[in-house]
């Protein structure tokens, strides 16, 4: 069953474009990543799914119901973590979670205690005293604690330290194994890679591609900067997957698409002083994908 | 209505509401306690009042007209149930009315709130009930304390007069609360909503106060809520004018319905 389905979903803010003609189907139990740079329309999409925005045209349904007409019934089964997370500053953590829990008398917060322990959050403090990371933890807990059928997460790891980010990724995997559908909006590619089955790439309000993560990885571009002990011939590194080579003295910058194994074996034949591998930015991957002057054309 | 949100809203206003209530009771005590000395020197006070320009008296009496300050009803009408009463309760009503939804939008908490299984109509009704309940309670506290303090200082007023003023006064402020709520859902910023609501209240007050001096003000006075309010008459007769009730109740219902309609369709984006 499609948990999320949008048909030609469009939102304009006056004359400004939010999203345009979004057609998206997300199946039950799927972890779907929604990738795009800031301003691409990720948050607008989530707000439309949450009936916080009224669509200019098109329709959206969640759990088989119209998002606008059946908004309250749908939200019983949804957990939402907004990207601009604003909480009731004067409340204590415990008070806030209890307040949120009382909205769903038929769905008690069965995961609350476990989540509070896992994210190591002190609920006795007032929210205004929380750090950015602790606010984010509280946001995650309020979204997940009632064991929703669908989770909408907008930039979920924003402000979390690396340890807590790992905890969050484990949590998503556990929820997926229990059948929960997860929609994650992010501009961080490694995050999407870690947890998602499929990814939708949104650019300037339009969905430009939907890929399985393994397909995306095979298309992923990385830069490998190598400093050799002595000058080398760049042509020696024209290997499968190497799409461009730039040379400055003993420094080579190789742009690689796909597997790195063959290049590493080649490099092993030289005396290397330093090596740095950098993933292409999301923007560069967009450009690479959609032929507007990415690394392949350099 | 959502009981959870209603209780939270009540908690939010408990400090400010209590402060207003305590302040009002103290203010009424101070004013009522000077009545015996005014009565002792009734002639002097009457002369003093007569020496004021009529415009000044009309301005501070709002819609109540010029009353005899030495009579119990006139004294209460001039000293309590006119200018300062409008200012004190009006400030609460506009502050909370525009903040009921406006504060949630301003602070961005509306996104978390409307992510819960609650309809927008239910959210606005829960907030509105707190606003209307708090407003009506302030009016009734004013009336109850006025009546009690009047008994202490031997200021004789009709209980039915106090009840009539309580009913009309409560509806008068509910109408202001309703249009403040409307501006809070219509305008994106609470400050703008408060500015619009206070501006309209002041404009209506000026219309009614200035109607004797300008033909345009006299013509427009019928759209002022103050036109249908006369505290001296209510206290004296104890009769509740049907026209006032219909105007205030109609205004309240109109703006509550308009608030629900606007809020149900508007975009919520912090």
Image (cartoon, helix red, strand yellow):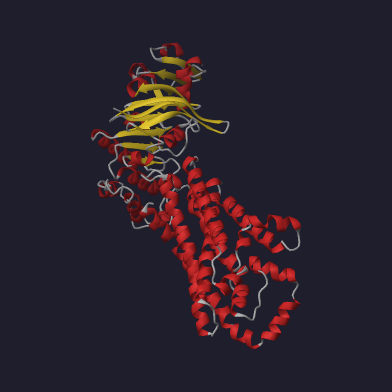
* Residue at image point 63% right, 73% down: B78
The x and y percentages for residue A116 are: 29, 49
> Quick check: B232 above or below A119?
below
From the viewer's side, name the closer residue of A109 and B143. B143
Q: Is residue B153 above or below residue A197?
A: below
Q: Is residue B153 visible?
A: yes
**Percent coordinates x, y for residue A49 in the rendering:** 40, 35
Which of B89 and B82 lies nearest the eye of the viewer? B82
Query: Percent x, y for residue A19?
Result: 48, 29
Total marks in image = 0
Is B109 rendered above or below residue A91? above
A209 with respect to B51 (left or right): left
Give the residue displayed 28% in from the left and 46% down from the top: A115
**Residue A88 seen in render:** no
Outermost residue, left side: A178
Q: Position of residue A179 (x, y in %)?
A: 25, 33
Q: Is residue A225 above or below residue A169?
A: above
Q: Is residue B131 left or right of residue B61?
A: left
Quarter of the picture holding the N terminus of chain A: top left
Which residue lies at the image location 70% right of the left edge and 85% below the top edge?
A: B44
Position of B187 with respect to A111 (left or right) is right
Q: Quadrant of residue B233?
A: bottom right
Q: Nearer the viewer, residue A227 or A117?
A: A117
């Amino acid at each position: 069953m499609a948990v999320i389905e949008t048909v030609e979903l469009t939102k304009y803010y006056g004359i400004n474009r939010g999203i345009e003609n979004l057609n998206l189907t997300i199946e039950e139990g799927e972890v779907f990543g929604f990738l795009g740079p800031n301003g691409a329309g990720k948050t607008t999409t989530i707000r439309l799914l949450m009936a916080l925005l009224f669509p200019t045209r098109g329709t959206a349904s969640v759990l088989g119901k119209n998002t606008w007409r059946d908004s309250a019934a749908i939200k019983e089964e949804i957990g939402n973590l907004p990207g601009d997370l604003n909480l009731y500053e004067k409340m204590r953590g415990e008070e806030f979670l209890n307040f949120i829990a009382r909205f769903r008398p038929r769905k008690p917060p069965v995961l609350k205690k476990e989540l509070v322990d896992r994210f190591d959050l002190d609920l006795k403090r007032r929210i205004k005293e929380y750090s950015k990371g602790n606010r984010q933890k509280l946001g995650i807990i309020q979204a997940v604690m009632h064991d929703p059928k669908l989770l909408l997460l907008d930039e979920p790891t924003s402000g979390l330290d690396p340890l807590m980010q790992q905890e969050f990724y484990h949590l998503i995997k556990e929820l997926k194994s229990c059948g929960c559908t997860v929609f994650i909006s992010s501009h961080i590619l490694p995050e999407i890679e870690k947890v998602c089955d499929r990814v939708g790439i949104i650019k300037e309000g339009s969905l430009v591609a939907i890929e399985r993560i393994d397909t995306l990885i095979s298309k992923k571009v990385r830069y490998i900067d190598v400093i050799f002990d002595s000058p080398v011939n760049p042509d020696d590194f024209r290997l499968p997957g190497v799409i461009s080579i730039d040379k400055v003295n003993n420094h080579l910058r190789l742009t690689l698409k796909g597997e790195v194994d063959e290049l590493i074996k080649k490099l092993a034949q030289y005396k290397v002083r330093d090596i740095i591998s950098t993933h292409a930015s999301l923007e560069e991957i967009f450009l690479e994908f959609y032929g507007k002057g990415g690394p392949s054309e350099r | 209505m959502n009981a959870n949100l209603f209780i939270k809203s009540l908690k939010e206003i408990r400090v400010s509401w209590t402060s207003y209530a305590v302040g009002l009771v103290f203010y009424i005590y101070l004013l009522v306690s000077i009545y015996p000395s005014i009565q002792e020197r009734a002639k002097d006070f009457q002369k003093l009042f007569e020496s004021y320009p009529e415009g000044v008296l009309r301005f501070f009496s709002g819609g109540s007209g010029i009353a005899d300050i030495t009579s119990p009803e006139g004294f209460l009408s001039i000293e309590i149930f006119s200018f300062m009463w409008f200012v004190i309760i009006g400030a609460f009503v506009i502050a909370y009315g525009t903040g009921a939804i406006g504060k949630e939008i301003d602070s961005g908490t509306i996104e978390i709130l409307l992510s819960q299984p609650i309809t927008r109509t239910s959210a606005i009704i829960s907030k509105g009930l707190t606003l209307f309940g708090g407003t009506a309670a302030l009016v009734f506290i004013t009336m109850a304390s006025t009546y009690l303090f009047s008994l202490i200082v031997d200021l004789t007023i009709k209980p039915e007069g106090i009840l009539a003023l309580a009913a009309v006064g409560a509806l008068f402020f509910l109408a202001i609360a309703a249009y403040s709520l409307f501006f809070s859902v219509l305008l994106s910023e609470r400050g703008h909503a408060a500015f619009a609501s206070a501006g309209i209240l002041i404009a209506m007050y000026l219309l009614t106060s200035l109607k004797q001096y300008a033909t345009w003000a006299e013509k427009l006075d019928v759209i002022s809520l103050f036109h249908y309010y006369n505290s001296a008459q209510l206290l004296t007769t104890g009769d509740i004018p049907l026209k006032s009730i219909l105007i205030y109740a109609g205004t309240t219902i109109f703006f509550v319905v308009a608030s629900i309609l606007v809020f149900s369709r508007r975009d919520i984006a912090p």
